[in-house]
Image (cartoon, helix red, strand yellow):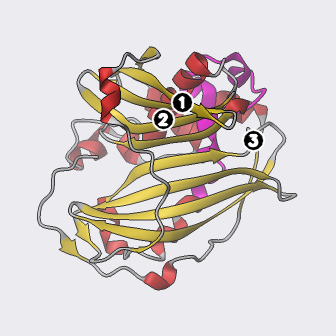
Amino acid sequence: MSEHTTAARVVEFDDAGLEIWCDEERFEVTAERTAEYAAATNDPIAAHLEGAVAPAVFAIVPVFEAMMMPVIDVAPMDIFGRVVHGEQDFHFHRAIRPGDRLVSRAKAIGYTSRPNGTAITIRIECRTETGEPVNDQYLTAFFRNIDAGKTVGAAAAAHKFDERLRGQRPVAVVAQHVDHDQTFRYAPASDDPVPLHLDEQVAKDAGLPGIIAHGMCTMAFASWAVLTEVAESDVHRLKRFAVRFAKLVFPGDDLETRIWRLGSADGVTSYAFETVRGEDVVLSDGLAEIAD
């Protein structure tokens, strides 16, 4: 989000809340649910729209209830008005399929104090009921203008955009549009009913010009752009997908996802990407790893 800062409030975080798994959450995947998610994110991939396999970013849905629980164990409740979803990093073992019965759990693994706020890193595991790994996720919860005073534990692996890439032509550029009803379709498809995405007055009371798009919806846009352009629309080939949420996106916005090839190693090709609105980068530090 915005890097603008005021004087940071000093807050003590609870180190005892680190490395404690939350209670397990269970989720049964249906073709109807995955197809609804694809439609809600303007995904053009037929297998997703037909419910044959879940879109990549659908992986956030089964873990939604678990993912923020560990934050409460580390950060005091009175600063939750300052938290934003800073980064999201998916590591895929396999695609999610209809009929999967998934079990998810999460824990805070560390926090990092920065000049403009403090970031808590959450590790999330998603497995089948039989224990088969499906994906691991790293979520960064960023508390704006909060100073925890120190850095403790681990952070997610880096996925920083190399600015030298701007001197190279992207391998693909995908134009995208956020529909005016996008948030009203995405909210039920993702089980994310936060009022900032649905209620104009609530958004304005929070100092916004109006309702904002879900960050994960914008990330889903970027995922299908990458899959269609460099992975033959095959979600099974996606091994890692990471972004930083840099700026707010609004209904009606025209976006563009730009993709650069980084290189190949051990049967996997890596790509950098970003999603922009005009001159504004709304998704930054994008990294996709595609099995060859």
- Kindly check if marks 3 and 1 are in contact, taking CB atoms under 8 A apart as contact: no
- Mark 3 or mark 1: name the one nearer the start of the chain: 3
Q: Nearer the viewer, mark 1 or mark 2?
A: 1
| Number of other residues with Cα within 10 Å of mark 3, as a class: few under 14, some 14 to 19, many 20 or more | some
The reply, left or right, for residue 141 in relation to residue 91 is left
Circle nearer the viewer, 3 or 2:
3
Quarter assignment of residue 177: top left
Residue 74 as seen in the image, left or right of residue 53 = left
Task: Please tell me in which quadrant of the rendered image residue 13 appears.
Answer: bottom left
Q: Which residue type carries mark 1?
A: Gly
The residue pinned by badge 3 equals 94
Q: CA distance from mark 3 to mark 2?
A: 19 Å
Label of residue 251 in the image: none
Q: Quadrant of residue 165?
A: top left
Residue 287: x, y in percent? 49, 37
Within 10 Å of disc 2 (Cα), the crowding (few <14, some 14-19, many 20+) is many
Q: Residue at x 75, y 27 (%)?
A: 51
Q: Which residue is mark 1?
A: 263
Q: Position of residue 128 (x, y in %)?
A: 81, 53
Residue extending furthest toward the right: 130
Residue 78 vertical placement versus 140 (above, below): below
Secondary structure at badge 1 equals strand
Helix, strand or loop under label 2: helix
Region of the chain picked out in magenta, as a range: 37-65
Left or right of residue 122, residue 173 in this image? left
Q: Which residue is mark 2?
A: 219
Residue 169 position, x and y percent, is: 37, 16
Q: Which type of secondary structure does the marked residue at label 3 adopt?
A: loop
Q: Position of residue 45 (x, y in %)?
A: 65, 18
